[in-house]
Amino acid sequence: MDDEGKKGGEFHSPDRTGQKGSSSGSAGREGLIRRIIIVEDNDNVAKIIARSLNDEGFETKVISYGSAATFYALEKNDSLLLMEYQLPDMTAKDVIVNLKESRIDVPFIIMSAPGNEKGVIEMMKLGARDYLVKEQGFLELLPTSVKNVIQQLDLEDRLAVTEQSLKQSEEKFRNIFNSITDAIFIYDFQGRILETNQATLRMLGVEERALDQLNYLEFLPEDFNKNFNLYLSELRAYKQLIFETTLIDTRDKKIPVECISRLIEYDNDSVVLTIARNITDRKQTENLLRQSEERLKRITETMTDYIYTGFVNNGEPLRTVHSSACQVITGYTPEELSNNPYLWIEMVDEQDRNLVLENVKRVLSGEQIDPYEHRIIRKDGKVAWLRNTPVLHFDETGKLTYYDGVVQDITERKRYEIELLEKQAHLNAIIKSFDGLSFVCSADRKIEFVNDKLIKKTGRNPIGEVCYRALHDRDEVCPWCVNEKVQKGETVRREIRSSKDNRWYSIVNTPIYHHDGRISKQSLVIDITESRLAEQEILRLNSLYFGLLEELNLPVCRFLKDGTIKSVNSAFQRIFVCDTDKPIENQKIFSCISEQLRNWTEKNLSNLSASNPVIRKIFKQIEISDETLYDRVWIIAAVLDQDSNVIEYQAILRDNTGPIMAGRNSVLHSS
C-alpha cells in the first residue's frame, strides 16, 4: 500500500445508492453508518472486499495501518470498521483498546485467518459485532455480515428511540413495539409479563389473551431461573446487559437468542425490557468456534489460579495485565501490580529471584520454557509457593507478540512435599542407625525392601525374591510365618531360632498400608543370641547363688528401691514375721522388720552408691525373752547395673546369737 494508504486510504463510491438506517445515533457514534472502513494491509484483498461491498451499495474507505484507522475513527466515528486482526503496526485489539481509552465506541467486524480462534475470542469480548474467517466462501458471507451488523446497530438505535417514545406516546410505542421482528418482553422483578410484541407471541407459540397468566421465567432454562436474582442485581448495577440464553416455547423447543436487557419506567414502576433475537442460524455457523471456546473453557476451568498476559515488542516487555484472581494468591490487586511495574519481581523470594529473572529473559527471547516453581512473599508477609507456566504467542512472521502465564498456588503441595521429605529423611536415619536387619515383604511374600545390613549379611540384594528362600534357604513358606496375621492388620512379635545359622532372633512384624489398599509386612530383626546366653548364665548363677545362701543359713532378701520384696530365702522367712495371707514377693520389706530396723534402713538407703555399696547396722544388745539372747548384724548391699546405677538392694542378717548362747551356758554350768 502506498503512502496514501498509510495516511488515510482511499474512498470507493458505490455503484448505486447505499442502504439507509434510522436517523437516531447511539452513544459514541455520530448517527448513521455512512461508510465501511476496510482496515486491511493486503492491497489485493482490500480491493476485492471494497468491490464486493460497493456492489451491495456501500461506500467504502481502505486503510492499511491500525494507527491510521485509529486516527480516522477519532475524527469521524460514523463508520463501521471491517478490520483484519493482524495489522503491520498493531493488532485490531490495540486499535479498539486505544479507541475505548478515548471513550470512542465504534462498531467493528473482525476478519482473521483460520486458526486464530484465541484472537477472535478476545475481539468478541471487546465488542466485535461479528467475525469472518478468510476461507473459502468468505466473500459471499461478507455482505450479509455487514448488513446484519448494520441492522443490529439500527436495532439498538431503535431500542433507544423506543424507550424515549414510551414516555411520550402509548400509541407510538405500540406501533414501534409491534413493528420490531425480534421478541420483546416487558416484565416486573418477579418475572410477570406486562407487555410483549407480536414477534414474541409467534416465537413462543402463545395466544395474546393468555398474557396475563404468563411469567417470563417459564420460558427460560432452569439455570437462569436459579440465578434470576443475581441477574436483576447486575442489571441494576450496569443498567444494561447483553447476553445469550435459550427460550423454551410451548412445544418445548429450545430457541437460542441474544438478549439486550435494560431497566425502564412503566406505569411509574421500574421494570425490565428485554429484546431477544433468534440466533439459530448464527449459532449453526459458529459451531466450530463454539467448540474451540468450549475446549478453551474446559482447560481454563481446570486451572485453580490466575492468568496474566505480558505484551512484548521486539523482545522488550511493554506491559503486563493480571486477572483479578491474582489478589487471592499474592494479596495484591491487579491495579497495584500495574501501578508498580517492578512489584512482580520485588515480591519474589530473594532465594528464587535469579531463577525467575533468568526464565523471564528466556521467554522474552522467544524460548518456550517448561513450567517452573518459585516462592513469593505475599502482601500479608506469608510465603507462598507458585507454579508458573508461560505460553508464548507469535505473529505470522514468528515474532513474539505476547505471552500468557498460568500461575498456580502450590503452597499446600509444597508443604506436604517438605513434610514427606523430612519424614523420609527421618526414616532413612532410623533405618541406617538400626543395628539389626530390616526388610519389607508383599502379600505374596516377595521382598520389596532390605537395609544395607541385610544385604551385607546375605551377600546380595534379594529384592524381588521370596523371603523364605532368600533369608532362610527354604523351598516353602516358613512354619513360623506371620504374614497372614499382618495382612489382617496385626502387629506380631516373636523370637525364633534360625535353622540357617543356629542363632536366636527377635522379630517385630508390623503392617505398612499403601494408598492403593495394599498391605506389606515390615520386619525388624535383632540378633538376641548373646542376650539369650546371658539370661541362661544369669539363671545358672542365680541358682548357684541361692543354693549357697541356703547352705549358709543366712537370712537374705532382695528388694526394689521402693521396698517391694523381689525374693527371699527360707532362713529369712523363718526369722522375720511377714503377712502370710499373700505371697512374700508382693510385700514390702519394711512391714517384715522391726520398727528400729525399719527406721534405720529407710534413713540409710540413700547413702548407698557405686562408691559406697554396703552399709551395716550392728545390734550389740542383750534382750531377755524366754532366756534368749540376740546378737545380730544387719547388712544392706546395693545391686548395680552396667552403668553403676543402683537398681535394687540385698539385705543379709548375720546372727551371732548361737555362739553367745553357747558361752552363756558354759558359764552357768561352771557355776
Image (cartoon, rainbow, N blue to C red):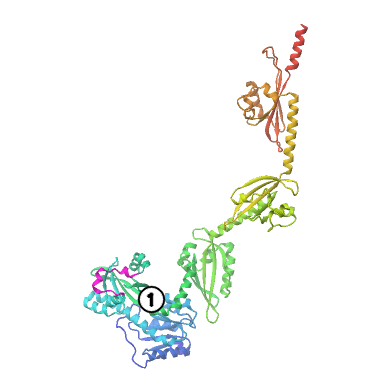
Residue 519: x and y in percent read 60, 54
Residue 350: x and y in percent read 57, 62
Magenta stretch, overall SS: helix
Residue 122: quadrant of the picture: bottom left
Count of picture labels: 1
User: Is residue 625 or residue 102 the one in the foreground?
Assistant: 625
Secondary structure beneath label 1: loop
User: Is residue 485 or residue 545 the one in the foreground?
Assistant: 485
Residue 575: quadrant of the picture: top right
Residue displayed at 38% across by 78% down:
280
Left or right: residue 526 versus residue 125 is right
Left or right: residue 318 versus residue 271 is right
Q: Which residue is mark 1?
A: 103
Task: Tell me which amino acid carries mark 1.
Answer: Arg
Q: Is residue 583 magenta?
A: no
**Range of residues picked out in magenta:** 204-220
Query: Relative to 228, is 153 above or below?
Result: below
Query: Relative to 604, is 176 above or below?
Result: below
Left or right: residue 336 versus residue 371 is left
Residue 91: x and y in percent read 47, 80
Q: Residues within 10 Å of mark 1 (few under 14, many from 20)?
A: few
Residue 177: quadrant of the picture: bottom left
Which residue lies most toward the top here?
Answer: 671
Query: Relative to 325, is 154 above or below?
Result: below
